[in-house]
Image (spheres, helix red, strand yellow):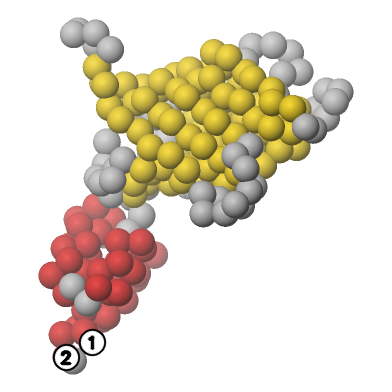
Amino acid sequence: MSIGLFHTRLNVSSSLLGAPVLTLDLLVDTANKKVSGVASIFQSTYPPLNFRARVWGEYSEAKLTADTENHIILTLDGSPSGPNSNIAQTFDLRGILGADWDSGFADYKYYDQDHWTTVRHAAVSQATAHNQRVEHPSHAHPLYAVAVQQAQASGDLAQLKAVVSQGEQQLASSGALRSALEQLQAEIARLEAR
């Protein structure tokens, strides 16, 4: 697993024909073991459903038996406007995923049309390539913008240099990313000149 931030997009569905399909579009912060993003539930059969919530939560790594690999225990809560609003919670998920975040099972519930609906033991899988918005759907892409912004806001030049160095090591092979890293290096030079 990469260190830092990465994006993943997961589908959660049961094997029942016409059952709702949950899509989780998540940003995973491995340093703090936090997760945030959007949950969308779609069902084309009657009654049609188009549910959406902002989600947040955390995860932990656990070894279920002595001779198995680590698993991810994922816990998410959600509401229409995020964790800091006064709007009541409308989404809840508890799941067990493989260490690579690409398979597993989850139970979730959502509040729609004045009642809670619960879906048990739904299969979790990576979203298919045509649903992905990233170039390489099977590869987690580290994202450093939040870490850079935090380092800039705190004025911690050493932290900013460390984030840029980590980005250089992992991402320097891409032309567009190389350009972004050059801009970050220019920002470091500007901060050092102050």
Where is residue 88? Give x, y as percent.
62, 43
**Residue 181 has which mark?**
none
Which residue is drawn at the image coordinates 24% and 8% (left, top)?
Answer: 65
For badge 2, the amino acid type reads: Ala
Residue picked out by circle 1: 190
Report the amino acid beneath label 1: Arg
Direction from residue 179 to residue 10 in the image, left or right = right
**Which secondary structure, mark 2?**
helix
**Where is mark 2, residue-wise?**
193
Q: How many marks?
A: 2
Q: Is the residue marked by circle 1 packed among few (<14), some (14-19), or many (20+) residues within 10 Å?
A: few
Residue in front for this viewpoint, 39 or 77: 77
Front residue of this view, candidates 74 and 178: 74
Point 22% across, 62% down: residue: 163
Horizontal and vertical percent for residue 24?
55, 36
Q: Are marks 2 and 1 in contact (CB under 8 Å)?
A: yes
Q: Quadrant of residue 144?
A: bottom left
Name the image quarter holding residue 44: top right
Q: Quadrant of the N terminus?
A: top left
